[in-house]
Image (cartoon, rainbow, N blue to C red):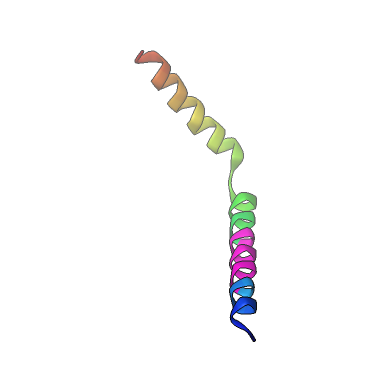
Amino acid sequence: MSKLQGIWSGLIGGTAVQTLVLAYLTIRCDWDEEAKVTSARMKKWASTK
């Protein structure tokens, strides 16, 4: 394997791993709960201004 092939293999492999991890985290996230938390933060932030 040439140096160039190694660089591209590493880049593609790293991107694939990153994509799989982010997809897993996105699927496992409780989006309704995240929306509630964000809404509470926004209300708190809006009341301080």
- Residue nearest the observer in this picture, 47 or 9: 9
Kindly give the residue lying farthest to the bottom in the view shown. 1
- The answer to whether residue 45 is above or below residue 34 is above
- The answer to whether residue 2 is above or below residue 40 is below
Q: Position of residue 38 (x, y in %)?
A: 50, 31
Tell me what residue is drawn at x 40 percent, y 21 percent.
Answer: 44
Q: Position of residue 10 (x, y in %)?
A: 59, 73
Tell me what residue is drawn at x 58 percent, y 80 percent.
Answer: 3
Magenta-drawn stretch, dominant element (helix, strand or loop):
helix
Start-end of magenta stretch: 10-20
Magenta stretch: includes residue 36 = no
Tell me what residue is drawn at x 56 percent, y 32 percent.
Answer: 35
Q: Considering the image in quadrants, where does the C terminus appear?
A: top left
- Residue nearest the observer in this picture, 48 or 10: 10
Tell me what residue is drawn at x 55 percent, y 37 percent.
Answer: 33
- Residue nearest the observer in this picture, 30 or 23: 23
Quarter assignment of residue 11: bottom right
- Residue nearest the observer in this picture, 42 or 36: 42
Q: Position of residue 40 (x, y in %)?
A: 46, 26
Q: Considering the image in quadrants, where does the N terminus appear?
A: bottom right
Q: Is 44 left, or right, of 9 in this rendering?
A: left
Q: Position of residue 41 (x, y in %)?
A: 43, 27
Count the numbered circles shown: 0
